[in-house]
Image (cartoon, coloured by chain):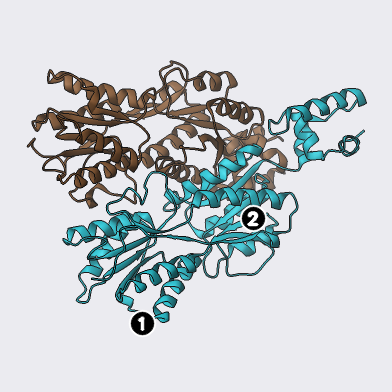
Chain colours: A cyan, B brown
Amino acid sequence: MNLKEFASRLELSQTTVSRALSGYPEVKQSTREKVLRAALELGYRPNTSALGLATGRVGAIGIVLKGGGEFGPHTSEFMGGLGNRLQKEEIDILVSTVDSTEAELTAYRRLAASKRVDAVVLHSPYIDDPRVELLTSLRLPFIVHGRPQAEGAFGWLDIDNFGAVHQATRHLLDLGHRRIAFLNGYRGRIFAEHRQDGYQTALTDYGLPLDPALAGNGEFTDEMGFRLMQGFLKLPDRPTAVVAGSMMSALGAMRAIRIEGLKVGEDISLIAHDDVFPYISPENLVPTLSTTRSSIRAAGARIAEMLLELLQGKPAESLREVWPVELVVRRSTAAAP
Amino acid sequence: MNLKEFASRLELSQTTVSRALSGYPEVKQSTREKVLRAALELGYRPNTSALGLATGRVGAIGIVLKGGGEFGPHTSEFMGGLGNRLQKEEIDILVSTVDSTEAELTAYRRLAASKRVDAVVLHSPYIDDPRVELLTSLRLPFIVHGRPQAEGAFGWLDIDNFGAVHQATRHLLDLGHRRIAFLNGYRGRIFAEHRQDGYQTALTDYGLPLDPALAGNGEFTDEMGFRLMQGFLKLPDRPTAVVAGSMMSALGAMRAIRIEGLKVGEDISLIAHDDVFPYISPENLVPTLSTTRSSIRAAGARIAEMLLELLQGKPAESLREVWPVELVVRRSTAAAP
């Protein structure tokens, strides 16, 4: 009797039977006992070395990160969500570190050739991103965190970056602000392009032109927020409001505003995108910070779920989600002075 | 001719030969060519499926993290350093997520049984830590990030936590401060115990008693620093100085001080331990923050190196390092008011 026949006698999936026989804790105790008893009764003996083959899985999800900048607070929160969900299936995360896009492509080839992951998470897609095409040609299943330009048979989860910045900018415009600065990520990344569109569309809604002097780009660090904000404050016609791309850049911007002797929420309104880091909260800042809010940890957990669904055979095209972003108004945004 | 004979003919290690034949980029181009030419000349044909066995490695280092709190800024910086060094050998990091110490022990058993890692990093040892004994009995090579209590045949890398807090507290005492608050990690973790000793020893050096009302413990978050500092400032005999365990808790403490209408570096001196996060720098704070400084990213890179040395057969006992911690005095520490 082979695994297939044995599983069908029990009216269970081959995966469940394999896992029950291997003692995986995510199979219910009662199911494990049932399978073990049936194996004894029916004389079924699993080939232990075939158990991995039976489920057809190695039990790992891959993620490739650039060593310089991608091991940051966003990634660790995202991976926390991913790991929390995957642990229930005893699936690990395999992190490959690379130092260039070329090396990233090589890493995917290596992961596919050595069969050390069942699927990968592709993160932060950019314009003319070669990774989607490569993964497709390697037949390595993947879910994208973000929304690639390219069409194809793959799933993705993205937040509404356009809506987040559009809402934030609209809120400031509604409060009477007309000079609104914008701290964005590097151009070329799709999320930053969507945010740029949101900013620009809100200005256009009000018939306002875009002033390039009020838009800055960079990594989302405290220092980036600090330096760009210092630049904005030196302008002859300085902004009365700022939209910051992250809590980190908002902290830097707040400091630059204070050093200039100005008050956040009075002289300068500030609104930030909050990825919900557990160690830095907008409610705790002084003044409390208005935010567009979306938990990157929740996104990690949902992408883990989508990867599991993909591996269970759900069509990739049905695994696409755009999460709306919530605007939370607190004390850092006020009517234009 | 087998691999061993072939390698000895070339006067190269079996690992180098296997890697050269597999096209690993870390083998020099000239060596790869030499090996390939010799294989042709001598009629040596590698069994490709045996290449992994030849090096005896799976090419992954394991790390087990608790899903709730351990995917934070410290871990991502540490993993960035680890990954940057390991990428040069095409070694990945396998992250297993768990929700309890019990599950962590199960994860190590699983990693050892399924041979999916060559070694693991054990992080943040605590009092009566069962993990060291388990890993030893599983014969899973490991390096500890931190310094376990237990003796044994394993390597570790730690920073001088005692010295860091001792120096910081001494510096404040030398400036005339006598009421010095201390934001520490949870008791029971070895690093927090060492820091506690450093704090206490500095006070004893000056003949001062320890006031339990001035010592607080928790995760190193902005909120922890904020709440504990608010508590300290409500004391009838409030502190004139604070030693904070991290940049995150220092940010919270600074805010609590400002809200109270007090000035950091004038009314209250502040010194923090800085793990050197690239996105939040003590030079950028206002006032600039005095710190005890040690890069957790550099520690990750060095531990990767130690793991490689361990796997190359270097005795674990020779892989033990305590890194001194540098005191950097900036504007947040001044003479007691």
Identify the residue shown where x is 31% and y is 58%.
Answer: A331
In-image side of B333 versus A295 (left or right): left
Circle 1 SS class:
loop
Q: Quadrant of the C terminus of chain A?
A: bottom left
Q: CA distance from mark 1 to mark 2?
A: 41 Å
Q: In the picture shown, does residue A320 fall above or below B24?
A: below
Q: How many marks?
A: 2
Task: Determine if residue B203 is in view.
Answer: yes
- Image coordinates for residue A104, horizontal then vertical, percent: 54, 56
- Image coordinates for residue B50, horizontal then vertical, percent: 70, 38
Q: Earlier in the sequence, mark 1 or mark 2?
A: 2
- Name of the residue lying farthest toward the top: B151
- Residue B238 occupies quadrant: top left
Q: Quadrant of the N terminus of chain A?
A: top right
Q: In the picture shown, does residue A5 fall above or below A218?
A: above
Task: Determine if residue B12 is in view.
Answer: no
- Image coordinates for residue A21, horizontal then vertical, percent: 78, 29
- Image coordinates for residue A317, horizontal then vertical, percent: 70, 63
Local packing at callout 2 (Cα closer than 10 Å; few below 14, some 14-19, many 20+) is many
Mark 1, residue position: A208
Q: In the picture shown, does residue A265 fall above or below A213?
A: above
Mark 2, residue position: A142
Local packing at callout 1 (Cα closer than 10 Å; few below 14, some 14-19, many 20+) is few
Q: Nearer the viewer, residue B223 or B36?
A: B223
